[in-house]
Image (tube, rainbow, N blue to C red):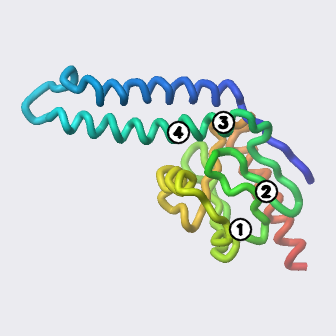
Amino acid sequence: MYKEIKFKKNRVILGILFFSLMLCVSVFFVVNPEIFVRNVFIKIWYIQFIGLAGIVYYLTLLYSFFRILPRKYAIIITDDYLIDNSKYESLGKIRWTDISKIQRLKKRSIEMFLRMDGYKTEKKSFLKRFLSMLHNWNYKKSILISSALMECSVEELFDLIVRTYRLNKKLQDA
């Protein structure tokens, strides 16, 4: 089996536009915080801190969306492995033997638990670790695959991944 799932480029571009707008708002919080002071309890330094946190967060998200824009495929599923390119911080090639459990998480996500020996071999940059931590609090044990930027629904993706995983597991047990 060989299945390729593409990105919805219009959603990636919409994300770039949204994060650019939010970055501009965050810069405005830092440059002109007096406008946002409403009462005695909100201080200027607090608004500037929120602006700086927003600048860091939205700048990293904007960078990650620019990095996935030229990618053609979000997910590639084969009999031996899954290639996850759905996010900038994705692991890439994951062998089916490195996956211990797959489950649905919320409306648009799939959570895959990885065996620790396969996961620890991956070296990530600080930015990738930062984004992984922000999007997945359980990032050391599992990865999240979201269908928000893909051309297929999460149900189709989940069924395809689970079917291929179970088929591979049966072949290994035999």
- The three-letter code of the residue at mark 4 reads Leu
Which class describes the residues within 10 Å of circle 2: few (<14), some (14-19), or many (20+)? many
Cβ–Cβ under 8 Å for marks 1 and 2: yes
Which one is earlier in the sequence, the residue at label 4 or at label 2?
A: 4
Q: CA distance from mark 2 to mark 3?
A: 17 Å
Q: Which residue is mark 1?
A: 99
Q: Which residue is mark 2?
A: 82
User: Residue 9 placed where, x, y %?
Assistant: 71, 28
Q: CA distance from mark 1 to mark 3?
A: 23 Å
Q: Which residue is mark 3?
A: 149
- For image coordinates 51% across by 41% down, the residue present is 60
Which one is earlier in the sequence, the residue at label 1 or at label 3?
A: 1
- For image coordinates 78% across by 53% down, the residue present is 83
Left or right: 41, with 118 as reference point: left
Compared with 164, 117 (above or below) is: below
Q: Which residue is mark 4?
A: 61
